[in-house]
Structure formats: C-alpha cells, structure tokens
Image: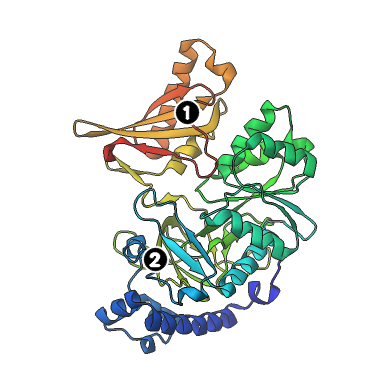
Amino acid sequence: MILDIGFETMPREDLEAIVLRRLKATIDRVYANIPFYRKKFEENHITPNDIKSLEDLKQIPFTAKEDLRDNYPFGMFAVPMDNVVRIHASSGTTGKPTVVGYTARDINTWAELMARSLAAGGATRGDIIHNAYGYGLFTGGLGIHYGAEKLGASVIPVSGGNSKRQVVIMKDFGPTILTATPSYTLYLAEVAEKMGVSFHDLKFKFGIFGAEPWSENMRQEIEQKLNITAVDIYGLSEVMGPGVAIECHEAKKGLHIFEDHFIPEIIDPGTGEVLPYGETGELVFTTITKEAFPVIRYRTRDITSLNPEPCICGRTHIRMNRVSGRTDDMLIIRGVNVFPSQIESVLMGIDEVEPHYQLVVDRKGKLDTLTVLVEVEERLFSDEVKVLQNLERKISKNIKEYLGVSAKVKLVEPKAIARSQGKAVRVIDNRKI
C-alpha cells in the first residue's frame, strides 16, 4: 500500500524541484543558527547563495560523527532548547554519544515517514504491530510506535527482552506484524521453539527488520522459521531514526529512500569522491525538512549503492541496496577487506550451522588472524569429533573461496554465543584492546 501517493509516486522533475526548494531553506537555516556549519561554509568560501542547484550540494564539506561529538551535547541544534520536545542519543560505546533533538513538527514528520514505511512493509490500519525494538534513547522503539499510531494500527509496545513473555503475548494477542532487529527475531524463534510454540500457528504476516546489517540468506531463514514475509527498514538517529528508507513488500529489491525529506549520495569512503548510480560506497545524507537537528552531507559509514530504476510498486524514489556493512565494522585481514555480513552469507548457505556467529580478530606477531565461532545444531554437536572437524574445514574452505582470506573456524554448542536483545555483537577485535 502506498500511503502518500502524491509524494511517493511524484514524477522525478517535480520531486527534484521540491527537494531543491527545501534544500535551500535548510542551508539558510543551518548557516544562520549553527556556528559549526557557518564556520565550515566560511572556511570553504561558500555562502547559502552559492547553492543554486542540487549539484551545488557537492561544494559543501561532509559532516562526520566526530563533528557531532565535538559539539556535544546540543551544539548542532538549530533551534532554542525550549522548542525541542524530544531528545534521543546513541549508546556512546565508542566515545561520547551523538545527541539528536526533535521539535513537535519533527516528531510529526517522523511519525508520517514511519507510517509510510509500515505501509510499504505490508501494514494496514487493521493490523496489530508487535514492536520488539528497544524503547528509550534508542530511536527504534518510539519511531515504530508513533508510526503505527499514525497509520491507525494497534501497537503492542513490548520493547526488547523478556522473550518468553513476548512469545506468550504473540499467542494471546494475535499480532500480525513483527518489528525487531533480525538477530533478536531469530532468538525469539529459538525461544518459541523451546516453549513448544510454532510461528506457523501464529497470525504474523509481515516482519519489518533493521538496525543492523543482515543478509539475503538471513532473510530466507527468518521467513522460513517465522512463516512471514520479511522486509528491510533503514534509518539512523543522526538523520531521523527508522523511516529513512524501506523495502516495499511487493518487490523486496532495494529500499525506497523518502527523497522528499532526505538527499542521498554515495561516495568513495577513502577519497570522498561522489560515485555514480550503481557503484558501491559510503552512504551520505542531507536532511531537508528537519527543524531541530538538520545535518548536511552526513557520512553514515554504511556501505551500499543507489538504484534509480522504477519499481513495480509504483514508487518513484531512488532505492538503496541492502547495507552490506559499515566502514567502521570493516575488518582488514592481511590486506583483505572483510565485512561480517559476507561471513554470514557463507554460513547461511550451510545447513548444519545455526544463524549465530561471532568473528574474533587477533594479532600474532605481525600477522592478523581471524577465528569464526559458529553454533551448530545440538544433534550435530554430539557427533564424533571427525564429523565436526570435517564441517570446520568445509566452512573454512568456503570462506577462503568466497572472500579470499584464511579463517580458523571453531564450532561451538548451541547458545554458546551471547544473544542480544538489540543489535548483535558480531566482531571482537582484540587488536584494539
């Protein structure tokens, strides 16, 4: 279902005219109200009047996460604090958290975008949405929640954790849409199986999953185990939260970016050069409707590509391909670039293993080593040692052939890898300790 036919199916020429008008207004606002941007403009001898076309956006320097941290907590806000009605923040596990603010209008815009997203993912006014994204400073839970209410659907604000209770609620309340991270979704499937509950007996039709990179193979695993259609949603708090882009359930071939609110670019992460459609690089966003916390050419660190081809669903907005990883999650092992999602793709093609894994990177002397911990089915773990050794060699061989990097594979028993109620911890890099 297309919720906003006017904007979502607008001819490109008309859409670009609106985008340019909104971009100019945003540039004026950040220049006047955010000292960080005014200084950046002046250092590069740019004024708002220099932005006359969408192409002129390339004149403006990038904004990085470090810039947000350097202006912690409220230095990047474009409105006085008495106009800010909500504050969210990142976890801050690798430094100061990034803090974002919303005006009342921003909250309404976000709710409308999330309603659009839920509709694209298969939700309707008559659905019951089981929202297992975390609530609090993380934007996922409240983003989905407000969007569901805007759509007119019923929402169960269950959040993450307390998984057995979640399964009971699924049985008793009969939700039809599931929203969660992909890794936590698979954990819920494990818990349900242990409780003797089959997802085939529940009422779920669609699942909307995001907040972490996941592979096409993991989608197939989720769809099979939960008996649903699974779609990918994308967002990040610095740009809005969830609802920046989503797959339509009709095609499931790339995520529609809501271009009437966000301008996407793909750049070479090393040089900053803007890349053409179809080439893979780092995703960059400029917000053009946010009041409290607008960002200009924000480097997301997410790796993807853009596809301008029309979609069968009728939406005209550019699509981004599934995020394959993040520049800060990319491991360089003996000169080879490795993303966790690439390892996942190999593992999900092997029937004997479970969809739970962890990469451990170490350094012995001057050489980096990669160990892949992989859970196996309980029945297999009790088999003779030779069977397990053969499977380890098979996985190691497949990784070598697919990625060109040698990895030691260690099979572990079920539940040996810690489960997350939010984003899964895929990498332990002991080189940084």
Please tell me how many numbered marks the rendered image carries. 2
Q: Which mark is residue 89?
A: none
Mark 2 sits on what residue?
275
Could you tell me which residue is drawn at 44 percent across and 51 percent down?
91
Q: CA distance from mark 2 to mark 1?
A: 36 Å
Looking at the picture, how far across and down is residue 238, in whole percent? 46, 63
* x, y percent for residue 120: 67, 61
Counting residues from the N terminus, which is met first, the one under dot 2 or under dot 1?
2
For the N terminus, the image quarter is bottom right
- Indicate whether 33 appears above or below 156: below
Is 147 situated above or below 59? above
Q: Nearer the viewer, residue 36 or 367?
A: 36
Which amino acid type corresponds to the residue marked 1 in the rendered image?
Answer: Val
Quarter holding the C terminus?
A: top left
Residue type, mark 2 in image: Leu
Where is residue 275? Give x, y as percent.
39, 66
Q: Residue at x 38, y 86 (%)?
A: 48
Q: Is residue 8 left or right of residue 212?
A: right
Q: Name the one closer to the observer, 336 or 289.
A: 289
Which of discs 2 and 1 lies nearer the camera? The answer is 1
Q: Give the quadrant of residue 141.
A: bottom right
Q: Which residue is mark 1?
A: 374
